Amino acid sequence: MIEKNAGGKTRRAQWWHREKNKFRCDLCPHACLISEGGRGRCLVRKGASGELVSENDGKVASIALDPVEKKPLYHWRPGTQILSLGTVGCNLDCPFCQNWQLARFSKDIVLKDIDPDEVVFLARREGVGSVAFTYNEPTVWYEFVYRTSARLKEKGLAAVLVTNGYITKEPWADLLLLLSAANIDLKGFSEATYVRLGGKLEPVLGRIAEALEAGVHVELTHLVVPGINDNEKEFRAMVTWIAEISTSIPLHISRYFPSRKWMNPPTSLELLERYEEIAREKLNYVYLGNVEKEAITHCPRCKSTVLKRRGYLTENQGVDEEGRCSFCHTPLGIVMK
Ligand code: SF4
């Protein structure tokens, strides 16, 4: 059953301006020009009663307690649980989307009302110190994510975003002030690849760099999709770009499985391992995702094993409370609390 706008409430959107009798959305680089009654490409911002409104404001489609490693975040409060919630809508249109029912607002998705205080209440009831906005693209849930992140911060809880990074600079800068960590998708490293996904590369690179500059803990995910981005030259260029910003950003190279409109076979393990090898030439922390394999973090200096993960179980073998290697005291950029 569809309950778009359960309770009939919508909230005035932030980040838009009027152009004659239309509304120009300024939230993401698409800059949709929306007529009264029309919607943007994300499906959740609508022209209504003379203004732009956020239709998914305060509407949750999915809420669960997850290991933080599932986001994936491997260097941020390892071994902890995180309250995770998402709604509907997305501003990209990846043919292989692994969560397309939420992204494209499938008819069988039921939305429930939620407010920031309830999120705080649930996090405390579950005894967790952090909340992730995830499952769909959280930047198209901007108003709710912003309000809730502000409330979480006020209450001493951490806000985390799992995002495609496809947002304009100003709203991103505001949101970064409230975030503790983010996993950002880097879906490819050419404009041609991003065009196939309905977006552009440059804004995503800008948002990654800005998140790091703002002091937010950042990890990157790259889903390798055969027929879309399995181009070694492009992958090498991506790794070089990441290394130029920082060799210590964790990179999760993830296995794709057929989904939505993309039915090519899953990414081969050989290709993933090849990419892992390439990335390790320049980056200190490279992990494979969606594979049954131990994920080990080594100290880049003394090479000791410091963290070991099997599935979502994490074993601390050598990280001290300050996120340094217990053997040689090298700072590892691992946030422990
Ligand atoms: S957030 Fe939605 S409505 Fe706004 S520009 Fe992006 S796709 Fe268009």
Image (cartoon, rainbow, N blue to C red):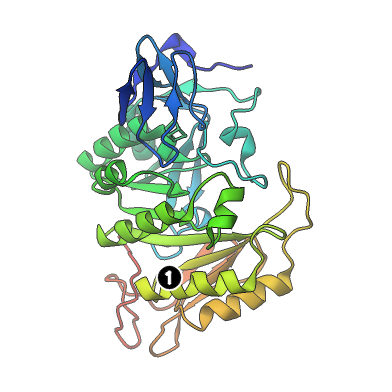
Q: Is residue 137 left or right of residue 167?
A: right
Q: Residue at x 43, y 49 (%)?
A: 165
Q: Quadrant of ligand 1?
A: top left
- Few, some or many C-alpha atoms within 10 Å of disc 1 (few <14, some 14-19, many ≥20)? many
Q: Identity of the amino acid at label 1?
A: Ile
Q: Secondary structure at mark 1?
A: helix
- Residue picked out by circle 1: 242
Residue drawn where x is 33% and y is 64% of the image? 336
Where is residue 116 drawn, in percent x and y?
A: 32, 29
User: In the picture provided, is 177 more to the left or to the right than 114?
Assistant: left
Residue 147: image x %, image y %?
29, 32
189 or 187, which lies in front? Answer: 189
Question: Is 75 located above or below residue 164 in the figure?
Answer: below
Q: Residue at x 41, y 35 (%)?
A: 31
Quadrant where the image shows the N terminus? top right
Q: How many marks?
A: 1
For this orientation, the residue located farthest to the left is: 154
> Can you see residue 55?
no
Which of these two is toward me, 122 or 108?
108
Q: Quadrant of residue 233?
A: bottom right
The residue most toward the bottom is: 302
Q: Is residue 43 visible?
A: yes
Q: Residue at x 33, y 71 (%)?
A: 333
